[in-house]
Amino acid sequence: MCGIVGYIGKRDATPVLVEGLHRLEYRGYDSAGVAVVHRGRLQVTKTAGRVQDLRDKLDAKQTKATVGIGHTRWATHGEPNDTNAHPHTDTQHRVAVVHNGIIENAEALRAQLIADGVKFVTDTDTECLAHMVAQELAESDDRSLEEAVIATLRRVEGTYGLVVLDTKDPDQLVVARNGSPIVLGLGESEMFVASDVAALVRYTRQVIYLEDGEVATIKATDFHTTTLVGGADNSIKTPMTVDADADDYELGAYSDYMRKEIHEQPDAIRRAVMGRLDERFATAKLGGVNLDARELRNIKRVKFLGCGSAYYAGQMGAALVEELARIPADAEPASEFRYRSPVVDPDTLYVAVSQSGETSDTLMAVQELKRKGGQVMGAVNVVGSAIGRECGHGIFLHAGPEVAVASTKALTNMAVSFSLLALLLGRVRDLSAANGGRVVGGLRNLPSQVTGILNAEEEIAAIAHRFAQAEHMFFIGRVRGWPVAREGAQKLKEISYVHAEAYQAGELKHGPLALIQPDMPSVVIIPSDDLIAKNISTIEQIKARGGPVIALTSAAIPDGLADATIRVPRAEPELEPILFNVPLQLLAYHAAAKLGRDIDKPRNLAKSVTVE
């Protein structure tokens, strides 16, 4: 969940490293640091806090170097302070290491190193790696840095993405991956390393993704890779072209990325459906699914696996599959899936959902499924990501780069993509051409309908400001509205720090009504379906107990029924949950802004969860 950057070439390395860390700050912002080799000596600068704090420290040093590594941290071992910030070094300051992941046998390694006379200065697991590499190098003058890193990693249990720098051999960096993403960027007589392409696109769009168990040695003009086990030479790797550029990561006229990404949703939806709607046969075209009509008909169940917002999007997808294709479908948190010894059905299609394509829990669920012979495809937003490569086929979300920790446009495009999948599955079964055409038309209308919601932002902001001081909120939904309620509560919690709980409307009277009181607002989701009367009854039950109500609805409900009402355009009933997410994003955003929160970088959270 941290950010890694490395550079070797002819440029001044420090500005490249700091710029890369700035672009990766959404992956971790407890502390940051860089290490460069200057006149044969290692110079390390690090600080608790943000990348800007690091930049201020570096501006006072004016150190120039052509090789270096950097890191922005989301703490797992040791509190976030100057000492525990990366990079970490050995006792002699010969070796520097930046590392993402968790070394599971760190305590045993630390005890062994202490017995060897090593004195530790940090509380981190990463410091072990620096000392171990240094020990391996000290054993023989002929030992290369690559050999020392491989020997070290063969003693390590856990996950890592790491870069190692040796001051006695500053013309190379050694990089390794196991469970934590690492990408190489290829330039003209220069090479880059990062944990995310966001740090590279300003300099190059030609990248190579390392596989788990791979080690790469990079120099300014070339690189080679090998494997940790067996030492196979994997040097022949074809670079991929990143479908993004530096402008995609700029804020432009917006004050923060979350609001920018909320407003990018109409275009994101257009990309998601472009070329995928078949008007003639009233169906969807999803070439990446890579299953023909007969194979699609043989699917007896669909299960979506994801974490956080991806899990809630999976719940929306499951409802769509059941409604349109009449196939049993459900969603499950990927973080729980592999630990419960799941029964893997060969007739089930499993869909692994992840914006980054690197979510550790979801990736491990995919690997568990493959071990048990399950049929699994990915739904990811990053080409070349670990989940995408592991699955080998699936749906590319086309949301574009998403930087804010709270997912908005990626979540929306997940739901849109699952609508396409449900439509495809339905049309190879019993969904009529008329109903298929209705859904196709509904999908085409979504971008303009989302634009209409965004045009009402000021009204939604006023409602958010009115209720922002509440310490607790309920989000209430029924059937189609239930996953929307869960996602709405998640958004409010993660960026405003207001405690929010989602509940199924029919379950209120089985306990939660005891919590209703005048200082606890409830957001009630009311789609235009045959449950309008029941949802109105839910509002009346809450109001009878003195609870304020915010109604989010596409239906014609009585004026004055709720304390505040957010109107959503009517859409095809199956697609309305997609629209309902957008005003809840704006509600959470403006509540957080009113409370003065750091919206893009909420406390204790990071964008891509690549550790357990």
Image (tube, grey):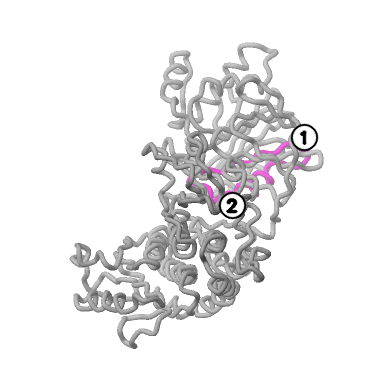
Please state the extent of the stretch shown in magenta in the rendering: 1-30
* CA neighbours of label 2 inside 10 A, class few (<14), some (14 to 19), many (20+): few
| Distance Cα–Cα, label 2 vs label 1 | 51 Å
Which is nearer the N-term, disc 2 or disc 1? 1
Q: Secondary structure at mark 2?
A: helix
The percent position of residue 248, horizontal first and vertical second, equals 66, 59
- Residue 145, magenta (yes or no): no
Q: Secondary structure at mark 1?
A: loop
Q: Amino acid at mark 1?
A: Ala
Residue at the (44%, 17%) spot, across then down: 114
Q: Which mark is residue 220?
A: 1
Q: Is 310 in front, or is 326?
A: 326
Q: Amino acid at mark 2?
A: Arg
Residue occupied by mark 2:
294
Residue at the (62%, 43%) spot, across then down: 392
As displayed, is residue 122 above or below residue 328? above
Q: Is 73 in front, or is 484?
A: 484
Q: Quarter of the image for the C terminus: give it.
A: top left
The percent position of residue 106, horizontal first and vertical second, equals 44, 26
As displayed, is residue 539 above or below residue 25? below
Q: Is 21 in front, or is 550?
A: 550
Residue at the (75%, 31%) spot, across then down: 223
